[in-house]
Image (cartoon, helix red, strand yellow):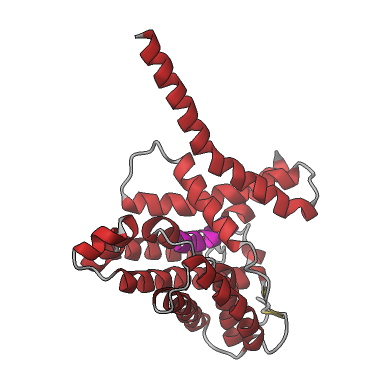
Amino acid sequence: MGSLINALPGAVSQGLVWGIMALGVYVTYRILDVADLTVDGSLATGGAVCVMMIRAGVNPWVALFAALVAGGVAGLVTALLHTKCGIPAILAGILTQLALYSVNLRIMGGKSNQPVSVDKYNLIVSQRYVREFSLSNPIIPIILVLAAIIGILYWFFGTEKGCSIRATGANKSMARAQGINPDNDIILGLVLSNALVALSGALIAQYQGAVDVNMGRGAIVIGLAAVIIGEVVFKKIKHNFAGTLTFVTLGAVVYYIVIQITLLLGLNTNDLKLITAVIVGLFLALPYWKGKVSDRRSRKGAKNA
């Protein structure tokens, strides 16, 4: 029990950082209804841009914004491949992700990883201070950034353009009949999604003190896990759209707490990918199983009546 309590601050802070990425995945997966695999590459792009700029002496907040822009550009490439070249969204994302591996290596000066020590640079977040109850604790700035992002997304998706994107995701043919250009909405949605993913990558790189060209591998799985967990765990709580966005980020926190618990049980760290797959599979299957049980009870009730 004591080990779990000691591990909780790290799991929560890491979950909050990945929660930003989960918001990006939610935009494409739920709102836009587009399968986008660009995130595995754009996460590392955000980290690479941020770390290299910080190492060059740039202010961390400016580097964070640059990472946001870089992620948006990556999303734009995928969107143009899909809308202007007729390539299926999932394949367009794979192509961009593949290209980003080389791009990220270029950004990182040809090296597969680059360190950014908190001793040498003024970082926004760092895991070193995760157990301190002070302003240096990374949980505080991450929560502030998350709150700002959720507020902006809540406002944006309430605007005419935001509603247009939601309409495109709900029914593309109906949206087109209403005079909406679905291609423009898909482009904007993918840019927004990957900008958030890259922002998350920039914070993750600072948090762990280094960026690695492979840091985004499997990121889409973690993002989908956070979305599904957020929807399943907090399903019965009455909430609006802002609440949905909040629960998505909390889904990432729950995910990392579950990961910590499984590791504390003594499982081999080499099995982490397997553990992740099992956890995500269980949460994905849970709504289906619950639906089956509800249908069975309804049929049983109808027979008894």
- The one of 117 and 262 positioned closer to us in this rendering: 262
Q: Is residue 170 left or right of residue 3?
A: left
Residue at horizontal 30%, vertical 56%? 171
Figure label count: 0
**Residue 227 vs residue 31, the one in the foreground:** 31
Quadrant holding the C terminus: top left
Q: Is residue 21 magenta?
A: yes
Q: Is residue 124 above or below residue 178?
A: below
Task: Tell me, yes or no, if residue 123 can be seen here.
Answer: no
Q: Residue at x 26, y 71 (%)?
A: 181
The secondary structure making up most of the magenta span is: helix
Q: Is residue 65 magenta?
A: no
| Residue at the (71%, 54%) spot, across then down | 273
Residue at image position (39%, 74%) is 83
Please identify the residue farthest to the top as the structure is shown.
304
Please identify the quadrant where the N terminus is shown.
Answer: top right
Measuring from the top left, give residue 99's x and y in whole percent. Answer: 60, 80
Whole-percent x, y for residue 223 in the image: 54, 57
Q: Position of residue 185 (x, y in %)?
A: 32, 70
Direction front: furthest residue: 86
In depth, the one of 264 and 98 nearer the eye is 98
Q: Is residue 34 visible?
A: yes
Q: Residue 28: x, y in percent?
A: 43, 62
Please report the bounds of the magenta region as a residue range.
Answer: 13-25
Q: Is residue 37 left or right of residue 174?
A: right
